[in-house]
């Protein structure tokens, strides 16, 4: 970023914060490929735990190749599949991303194969037309490109776009019934029977993406179901599968996708039919095909074509299932109070009258109660990113040692609590991870066990720019570990637990 000609990539006056992006699949004809590329259709879907590739396709290259895409927006992220070789510090493949000819570099990697991995990103660009270029070079390992997400210009027409609406979007604040809760800084979650979600959208289809979390108290719940109703029609059942015994938290899971709809406005009401002993319903983001987004003029008026739920009462269709087993798939019982039955599939009408208060809000115990209490939602964070830490090795049985002090410059990055005798430090965005000397047992925010056998203390602190004024963020360099060991570790983007403090660090 030392180019003095960096007039295009620069801090900008950002529009009111929303959590909406335009998603561009690798198969989009607007992407211009140069060099030898080939398409892949799902061969890597089962790799890692970040879910299948977006929309079932990847573009790969085994040579030097590039791609270009023009967009109008203020922020951009490029996704692919992380599957690289590290031969004595020489990486294969390598790539570099550019906006309007100015390099924005590439993101950090991990040792495992993961889909939906950030290849590069630029948080702040001045509003306007831009050209994204990705140059890839390979030797033996394939470079995989999956999708582009960008935050569109406020005045841009999105009538033919695919729009991602994040669970934290301001337009969804009234969509959740009262028995939903934040799941860390990633998703919203409920394990209360008959919890509802109502959303108005404009488009020809909607897909619901969530995650299947692991909980140390109840690691493998039973399968269950939910239903969704489009425009007051017939309920459609979808399955919420439990985690299997050999898996960890699974991300980017598509729980359902509506059939093709007529273009225009629609309403969807989703009802959870499980309970505290079954897989919870989570919402990470919605994908709306051919969605629209009117101009954004203020925080209060930000909208994706009428996202505020309708207050029009809906009735339960006559063919709604009629029993509720204690465990496993749950459906609407016949002995449910009339007032509740009449509103199971009704959009929430007010904070006081939502379905959660009618059926009784279960305390946030059950599926992930222990984890959520310890690693609570970081509510101050204005925008969410999805760079999750991958499993490196199996966890050891040693507990982390208690931390007695924090460096002065850490006090505004972390807050401490305890999970049993394990100190937990909730890191603010893009903060840190640390691994103490010897064999380490560190469980991060998302349930991954980590271990290192290095004899030296390793520490990584990345991208503290989020703590600086917006105009200064891009000028801050990442930090890297000071270590005496020759055992390198990848630098994950986010992490939540710190087992030991390092003595020092340096810039890259």
Image (cartoon, rainbow, N blue to C red):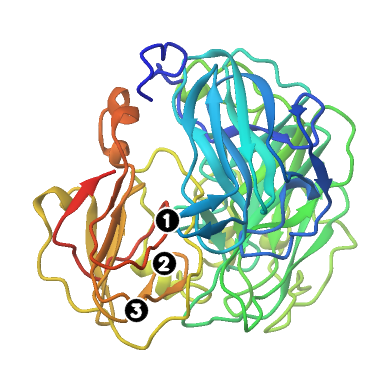
Could you say whether the residue bearing mark 1 is in a helix, strand or loop? loop
Q: Residue at x 40, y 16 (%)?
A: 13
| Mark closer to the chain start, 3 or 1 | 3
The reply, left or right, for residue 52 in relation to residue 370 is right
Tell me the CA gap for discs 2 and 3.
30 Å
Mark 1 and mark 2 residues within 8 Å of each other at the beta carbon: no
Badge 1 is on which residue? 492
Of the two numbered discs 1 and 2 on the same chain, state the one appearing first in sequence.
2
Viewer-closest of 347 and 67: 67
Quadrant that contains the C terminus = top left
**What number is the disc on residue 453?**
3
Badge 2 local density, few (<14 within 10 Å), some, or many (20+)? some
Disc nearer the start of the sequence (2/3): 2
- The image shows residue 170 at horizontal and vertical percentages of 51, 35
Task: Classify the position of the N terminus by image quarter.
Answer: top left
- What residue lies at 57% left-to-right and 76% top-to-bottom? 276
Q: CA distance from mark 3 to mark 1?
A: 18 Å
Q: Residue furthest bottom?
A: 397
Q: Are marks 2 and 3 in contact (CB under 8 Å)?
A: no
The residue carrying mark 2 is 372
The answer to which of 22 and 488 lies nearer the viewer is 488
Question: Vertically, is 483 above or below 289?
Answer: below
Q: Secondary structure at mark 3?
A: loop
User: Is residue 287 visible in this depiction of the protein?
Assistant: yes
């Amino acid at each position: 970023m030392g180019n003095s000609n960096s007039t295009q990539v620069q801090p900008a006056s950002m529009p009111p914060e929303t959590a909406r992006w335009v998603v561009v699949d690798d198969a989009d004809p607007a992407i211009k490929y140069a060099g030898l590329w080939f398409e892949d259709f799902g061969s890597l879907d089962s790799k890692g735990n970040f879910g299948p590739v977006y929309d079932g396709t990847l573009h790969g290259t085994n040579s030097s190749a590039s791609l270009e895409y023009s967009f109008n927006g203020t922020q951009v992220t490029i996704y692919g599949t992380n599957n690289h070789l590290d031969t004595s510090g020489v990486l294969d493949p390598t790539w570099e991303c550019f906006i309007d000819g100015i390099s924005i570099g590439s993101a950090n990697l991990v040792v495992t194969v993961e889909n939906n991995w950030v290849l590069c990103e630029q948080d702040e660009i001045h509003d306007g037309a831009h050209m994204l270029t990705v140059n890839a070079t390979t030797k033996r390992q394939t470079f995989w490109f999956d999708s582009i997400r960008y935050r569109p210009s406020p005045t841009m027409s999105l009538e033919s776009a695919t729009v991602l609406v994040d669970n934290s979007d301001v337009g969804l604040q009234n969509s959740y019934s009262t028995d939903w809760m934040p799941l860390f800084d990633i998703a919203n979650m409920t394990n209360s029977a008959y919890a509802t979600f109502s959303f108005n959208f404009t488009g020809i289809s909607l897909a619901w993406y969530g995650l299947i979390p692991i909980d140390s108290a109840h690691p493998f719940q039973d399968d269950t179901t939910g239903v969704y109703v489009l425009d007051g029609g017939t309920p459609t059942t979808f399955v919420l599968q439990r985690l299997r015994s050999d898996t960890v938290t699974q991300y980017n899971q598509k729980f359902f996708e509506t059939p093709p709809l007529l273009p225009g406005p629609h309403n969807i009401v989703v009802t959870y039919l499980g309970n505290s002993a079954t897989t919870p319903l989570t919402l990470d983001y919605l994908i709306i095909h051919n969605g629209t987004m009117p101009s954004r003029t203020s925080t209060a008026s930000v909208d994706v074509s009428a996202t505020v739920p309708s207050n029009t009462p809906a009735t339960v269709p006559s063919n709604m299932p009629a029993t509720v087993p204690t465990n496993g798939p749950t459906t609407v019982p016949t002995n449910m109070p009339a007032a509740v039955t009449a509103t199971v599939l009704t959009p929430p009408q007010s904070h006081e009258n939502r379905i959660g208060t009618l059926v009784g809000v279960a305390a946030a115990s059950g599926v992930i109660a222990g984890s959520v209490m310890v690693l609570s939602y970081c509510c101050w964070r204005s925008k969410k990113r999805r760079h999750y830490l991958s499993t490196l090795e199996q966890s050891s049985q040693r507990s982390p040692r208690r931390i007695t002090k924090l460096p002065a410059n850490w006090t505004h990055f972390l807050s401490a609590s305890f999970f049993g005798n394990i100190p937990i430090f909730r890191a603010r965005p893009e903060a840190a991870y640390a691994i103490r000397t010897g064999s380490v047992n560190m469980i991060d925010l998302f349930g991954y066990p980590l271990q290192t056998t290095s004899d030296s203390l390793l520490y990584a602190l990345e991208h503290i720019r989020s703590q600086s004024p917006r105009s200064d963020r891009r000028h801050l360099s990442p930090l890297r570990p000071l270590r005496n060991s020759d055992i390198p570790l990848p630098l994950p983007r986010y992490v939540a637990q710190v087992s030991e403090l390092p003595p020092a660090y340096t810039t890259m």
